[in-house]
Image: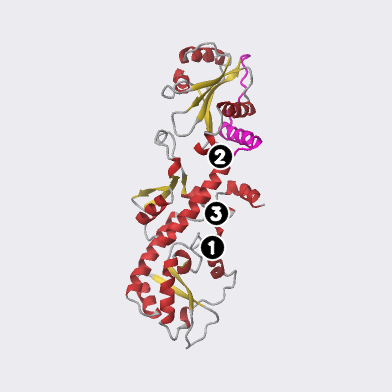
Amino acid sequence: MNNSATTRAITKIALEYNGNDKGTAEMVASNYLLSDTAEGQYQEMKTVAERNPKVKKWALTGYISQPDEIGRKLKDEELTQIAMKALTKVGATDRNQYRLDIHNSTKHKHIHFVVNRIDSSGKCTVRSHDIGRRFGEAVREVCKEKGLLTDIEIGVKKKSEMLKSLTEAMRSEDNFDELILAMKKKGFEIQLSSNVKDGISGMRIIMTKDINLQTVRQYKGGYKLSEISNKLKIYEIKSLFEMKKAVREAQKYAYSLEEFRENLKQKGFSVKIQYDGEFKPNQKNQIKDIWINKINSSQEKDGFFFRENMGFSLSVIDSNLSNLINSLSQNNVKNDDATHLKAEPKESLIENAGVLLGDFLKPTYVPQDEEELWKRGEN
């Protein structure tokens, strides 16, 4: 479940918001509040809060929200129980004032809460330190007790779907405009950010079904590219599209491997050939793959598709280019061994490239804090 919690000094507006929701809010729980109005309840809470003048941010406010496909299945009593148990875990007691309201006007049903951190005896029972993290952990504990998916588990599933769809689209499309359209067909919206220095500098991916126009001003949906994968970077995507464009232009005027290599060299790219089997000088050698790298490239470390000292494998980054490989292979009776790939001294990066697309769901492609969750899922 998505959730948020923060401490602050509130006004009556917070209680008015809780109890309104365009006239559809439903109060499902309250404690030590006698008034029926937001103004009256605020004054009651403020009076109790003043018993501990050292605490300035005397209210705990926040919400718990479940994705629509799960949230609508929960009864209001169940959602209320989850919220109350989580609040108890962070320090709320039966001597604290609170009000909980369920909101139904937005796409995702959610519950809002306002809790007085000061109890009736003047004691502050809810610590403010790290409250957002602690409340999130409390919600996850309650969800696990009830057999419900947590926000992290939901996030892992969504991110894996996003990464798989994104990399598939990257292989089939040649630029960002095509990528956006392809992802839209797959049920995702891509939002690109840019700056004067770098041009396109960032990416956010959102599941179309999760877009909530009523809350877009409050928080951004979806995930940034860096949250989806710690391997795939925006500059690698830009490099891949740049290379694809160069390859397609070079192949238009290439009837042999030598011409193809020379055309790419003029565009600033180097070419390495991987032959099928042992290379035999002055004989016809079947081409298995072609690796292309930008000369003097700033990208040196392994990426998602990019391989250090190798570049991009045509067979991996674009299955449509396999015809090019076959064509060049047939047109080359004798092959020059000057730029062919010899055995790798380390692990075989070429072999790894062949199974790269099967690695989408491995922990190395998700943020570090989710690695333990992945490991549990693999057992």
- Would you call the spot at circle 1 few (<14 residues within 10 Å), some (14-19), or many (20 or more)? some
| Residue at the right extreme of this rendering | 379
The magenta segment: 120-148
User: Is 170 covered by the magenta stretch?
Assistant: no
- Upstream in sequence: badge 1 or badge 3: 1
Helix, strand or loop under label 1: helix
Residue 56 point in image, percent of width and height: 53, 21
User: Is 142 covered by the magenta stretch?
Assistant: yes
- The front one of 4 and 157 is 157
Q: Give the residue at mark 1.
A: 356
Residue 140 point in image, percent of width and height: 61, 36
- The front one of 308 and 261 is 261
Inspect the image, locate mark 3, and give the three-letter code of the amino acid beneath it: Tyr
Q: Give the residue at mark 2.
A: 151
In this picture the colour scheme is secondary structure
Residue 112 point in image, percent of width and height: 51, 26
Helix, strand or loop under label 2: helix
Q: Say which quarter of the image contains residue 88.
A: top right
- The front one of 82 and 228 is 82
For the N terminus, the image quarter is top right
Residue 192 point in image, percent of width and height: 38, 49
Inspect the image, locate mark 1, and give the three-letter code of the amino acid beneath it: Leu
- Residue 365's tag is 3
- CA separation in Å, label 1 and label 3: 12 Å
- Residue 282's tag is none
- Would you call the spot at circle 3 few (<14 residues within 10 Å), some (14-19), or many (20 or more)? many
- Upstream in sequence: badge 2 or badge 3: 2
- Would you call the spot at circle 2 few (<14 residues within 10 Å), some (14-19), or many (20 or more)? some
Helix, strand or loop under label 3: helix
- CA separation in Å, label 2 and label 3: 19 Å
Circles 2 and 1: CB atoms closer than 8 Å: no
